[in-house]
Amino acid sequence: MEEKIIYFDNAATTKIHDAVIEEMIDIYKNEYGNPSSVYDFGNRVKTIIEESRKSLATNLGVDPKEIFFTSGATEANNWAILGTARKYKNKGKHIITSTIEHHAVLHSAKQLEKEGFDVTYVPVTEDGILDFEEFKKAIRDDTILISIMAVNNEIGTIQPIKKIVEYVKDKDILVHTDAVQLIGKKNVNIIKDLGVDMLSLSGHKIHGPKGIGALYIKKGVIIQNLFFGGGQEKKKRPGTENVAGIVALSKALELTLENIEEKENKILELRDYYIEKVIDKIPFVRLNGSKQKRIPGNANFSFSFIEGESMLLALDMYGICASSGSACTSGSLDPSHVLLGIGLPHAIAHGSLRVSISEYNTKDEIDYLLEVLPGIIDKLRKMSPLYEDFIKNKGVN
Ligand SMILES: *Cc1c(COP(=O)(O)O)cnc(C)c1O
């Protein structure tokens, strides 16, 4: 059955580029040897892995020796945080992160608290940007690690990573960034530019497959292993390599970065058109997160008097995929910690809609969304007792 899907949930996961799938099929069919084997049929797979590592590193502007493949960004974040803390626990037991991190970071930090570490969760401003004054105050003599995301996955805000690195450069503190939502979005030497010690990325957010990612570890930086086993990934990350995933990750980044400026301009145009029309067509809305300091593909609105889940279900009837907060939090009744983090009251945070746009989206799709959304909001509001009270009190029609 051919099903028309209008996909606006690119911050949750993305469509795999066709050429990436083709490369994966080729690997699965023809290169199934074990890269650690002695015979050529296995050994040549090792070469394929190293070529992929080189291509990925080149596109990230780093040395291939600094790239370690993982099962995704969740593992990369866990590794960076737990691996650093456990390695340097005798030097200090304090870690700094923010209140709006992905759960892969927040829950790693919570685990460290159980292991006797002290964690400071630095708040963000109402614009969704790290409160730098609070960040400065959080630094202590026993701080060993700072982990702040490069771009927030829910509201798309860009965090001041370079400024953080600059600020602590004379201190003996490692800086990690979860750059899942930044990688593949700019064709510059992102990592060198940020100057971080460690950086996490994920395949399925850049039109690659799920279950593959990488941790960049700057030359000279040593952290503890998370897993124990064979000698793969220079004895730092054991387990038989996900060869098709590695090839796919590197190919996905290469293809995503092709004509990146053109793509980003198009995405930005669609996004700004959507934002403008929503504000124009729908009353009582609020754009969450800084308008300026945000990546092009993200638009996150709160619609007052509405329940996010019912909005998503209504959109689903039209074949439109979007998100309310983050995919990881749906199924839970608590509103998103990110929206609470920027100071939204519970009721407003509940009524949020994240539309995340990729190179595969078109203006027609945005127009279709804009055609159905106002009606959905209107209908849901008419069913809302809160809205009824509000209208009565204000005398608004
Ligand atoms: C998706 C995402 C992750 C998790 O990546 P996986 O590869 O799915 O484990 C981590 N951080 C951010 C910001 C994300 O958007």
Image (cartoon, helix red, strand yellow):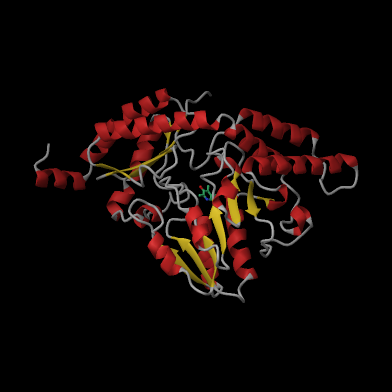
Q: Seen in the image, is 377 located left or right of residue 15?
A: left
| Nearest the eye: 326 or 175 | 175
Residue at (43, 45) in percent of width and height: 156
329 left or right, relative to 372? right
Q: Position of residue 130 (x, y in %)?
A: 41, 56
Residue 254 at x, y percent in the picture: 63, 35
Estimate the x, y position of residue 152 in percent, counting from the top left.
45, 49
- Between 126 and 347, which is closer to the camera in this rendering? 126
Q: Residue at x 89, y 40 (%)?
A: 40
Q: Residue furthest right?
A: 39
Residue at x-position 28% and y-position 52%: 347
**In the figure, residue 321 lies in which quadrant?**
top left
Closer to the camera, 16 or 131?
131
Count the labels in the image: 0
Q: Residue furthest left?
A: 395
Q: Position of residue 324 (x, y in %)?
A: 39, 44
Decide if residue 50 is in sight here. Answer: yes
Q: In the figure, 209 relative to 71: above or below?
A: above
**Visible in this render: residue 102?**
no
Instruction: Place residue 381 in its image quadrant.
Output: top left
Image quadrant where one finds the C terminus:
top left
Q: Is 321 situated above or below 69?
A: above
Q: Residue at x 59, y 48 (%)?
A: 191
Q: Quadrant of residue 203?
A: top right
